[in-house]
Image (tube, helix red, strand yellow):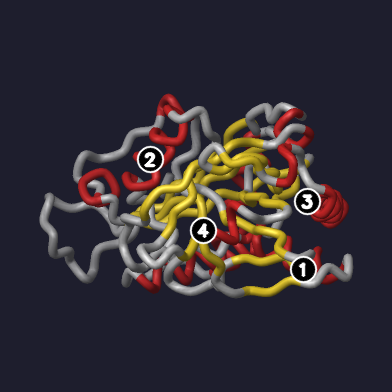
Amino acid sequence: MNGWLGALEDARVSVNDRGYNFGDGVYEVVRAYNGVMFALEEHLERLALSAAAVEIDLPWEPARLKNITKDTLGKSGIKEALVYIQVTRGTAPRNHVSDEEMRPNLLVTVRNMPHIPPSLYTEGVKAITMPEFRWQIRNVKSISLQASVLAKRRAERAGAAEAIFVLPDGTVTEGASSNIFIVKDGVLMTHPADNRILAGVIRHFVLKVAGTLDVKSVVEPFNILDLVKAEEVFITGTVAEVVPVVNVDGKIIGGGRPGPLTARIHKGFVSLIK
């Protein structure tokens, strides 16, 4: 943290940190496989884009951030890890208007990768839909995640793994912590990378994998009827990679079992990592 290195329980953050007071910051989560971070450069590029979108000037060159992150992971000794990178606008007495000369705070943490049960992929998960009620620049990976926290809580109460946001016109955007894909008439579909979704790094590589497998994919909006009538549905994210969805709002997807195209995409993604 800002050059200090130590155990998580020994770290301290000022009560005047703008991340604490305002959620005024951006972040990335990178997964490490056997001590090597996957797509670190892509994550750092998105971190820079998020920071620029909320007018936080990063004082570190990309190469410096890359070295800090790699060094922290290496010193942790953790091979299968989740690496969290957070930048807040800085530290100052609480005031909505910040000092233009304020220096951002940098936090990099390394944790053990949580266990993912194999049943996640062999059986799939349930999801619910809910009206979109977040802000209008969802392409920014902001640490202000209260809306997503509420959505996840509602999903958990419904016995579901994810909440999928739907616009007033019925357009499906993304999950509370994932991007969403459907298979319609054999074609892979996902929402465009505009301000209405956070364009996930794994989403990007899934589209690349689809190309290598000669799977036709289109990046265009689809609606809730397309979702519930889809042949297959899956969600993507850094932690769990590619997860089949077999039930949406109590409606069975694809016979209630993970679909063959989802399995092909996940297998291709795993091969890409290796």
Of residue 74 and residue 127, the one placed in the foreground of this image is 127
User: Dot 1 surroundings within 10 Å: few (below 14), some, or many (20 or more)?
Assistant: some
Q: Residue 224 carries which label?
A: 4
Could you tell me how far apart the alpha carbons at marks 1 and 4 are, in whole angstroms?
25 Å
Three-letter amino acid code of the residue under disc 2:
Val
- Residue 3 is situated, as x and y percent measured from the top left of the image, at 45, 47
Three-letter amino acid code of the residue under disc 4:
Ile
Mark closer to the observer (2, 3): 3
Q: Residue 240 carries which label?
A: none
User: Dot 3 surroundings within 10 Å: few (below 14), some, or many (20 or more)?
Assistant: many
User: Dot 2 surroundings within 10 Å: few (below 14), some, or many (20 or more)?
Assistant: few
Horizontal side, residue 220 vs residue 86: left or right: right
Residue to which mark 2 is pinned: 149
Indicate which disc, 3 or 1, sits on the residue closer to the N terminus. Answer: 1
Q: Is residue 221 visible?
A: yes
Of residue 35 and residue 150, the one placed in the foreground of this image is 150
SS for dot 1: helix
Label count reads: 4
